[in-house]
Image (tube, rainbow, N blue to C red):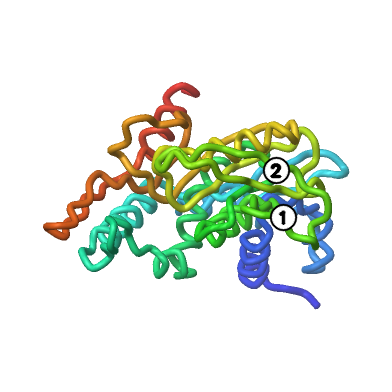
Amino acid sequence: MKFRRSERLIDMTNYLLEHPHQLVPLTFFADRYSSAKSSISEDLAIVKETFEQRGIGTLQTVPGAAGGVRFFVKVSEEESKPFVEKLCGMIAEPDRLLPGGYLYLTDILGDPAIVQKAGKIIASAYADSNIDVVVTVATKGIPLAYAVASQLNAPVVIVRRDSKVTEGPTVSINYVSGSTKRIQTMVLAKRSLAEGAKVLIVDDFMKAGGTVMGMMNLLEEFKAEVAGIAVLVEAEKIKERLVDEYLSLVRLSDVDVKEKRISVHEGNFFQKINEVRSVLK
């Protein structure tokens, strides 16, 4: 069956968006649409230009007989900033306050549209980092970790508080919580990570960074390389931050329980990304 160019472009775009970071041979598209490779190359050039103009992502061309194209997500700052501003507004709603000064974020982390968008933005920062695994702890951050991983074509590994019989032999460590200073335990199945894996740590909320530091210490037991740390929300007024290098989309500045006021603003994401870009220039 012969496809018109418009049909090829729509289907090709959809396929690439659904298979990020996967190398797709030109022969695959040529066979799929019964078209010459030269026509496929022209189509891909159009898709690449559109992706980059719209701030969706880019296509990497791999030459050679075993080559092809690979889609990397790249969300533009013009598109990301309004989303982060909207997210700040949602988190700043007074009715999110819970007893003890905690915030209710379950609805946000349970909204597929919000989580997928946040995942794309975070993934765009690590699109060129060749991430092997996305690691998170067994909390509300799991949906965000999967959203990021889906854009990086990487599996998700979940660090747990206790061992499960179904996971076989495990490695466990004790760590000190950065905010409560309590000793807690982290467990990870030995089969979860290959030695030397390049890891991206993703979490929903970070105070002093004790949990993240605990994950980093646990990953050392696997000789894994931590390529980055990304969180949805970070608390700003912390006496001692245990983690220095990380990305955050939202920064929680202050919580006034008496006045029912939550001060929230943009995290360090755009600042960090722009710093990297200026160095590369």
The local secondary structure at tag 2 comes to strand
Question: Percent x, y for residue 44?
Answer: 66, 54
Label 1 amino acid?
A: Ser
Tell which residue pokes out farthest to the bottom in this image: 1
Relative to 208, is 37 on the left or the right? right
Question: Percent x, y for residue 175?
Answer: 57, 38
The residue positioned 29% from the left and 59% from the top of the image is 91
Q: In the rendered image, which quarter contains the N terminus?
A: bottom right
Judging by the rendered image, the residue that carries numbered circle 1 is 163
Judging by the rendered image, the residue that carries numbered circle 2 is 172
In this rendering, the answer to whether 112 lies above or below 152 is below
The residue positioned 60% from the left and 54% from the top of the image is 151
The residue positioned 50% from the left and 62% from the top of the image is 116
Name which of mark 2 and mark 1 comes first in the sequence: 1
Question: Percent x, y for residue 137?
Answer: 58, 51
Label 2 amino acid?
A: Ser
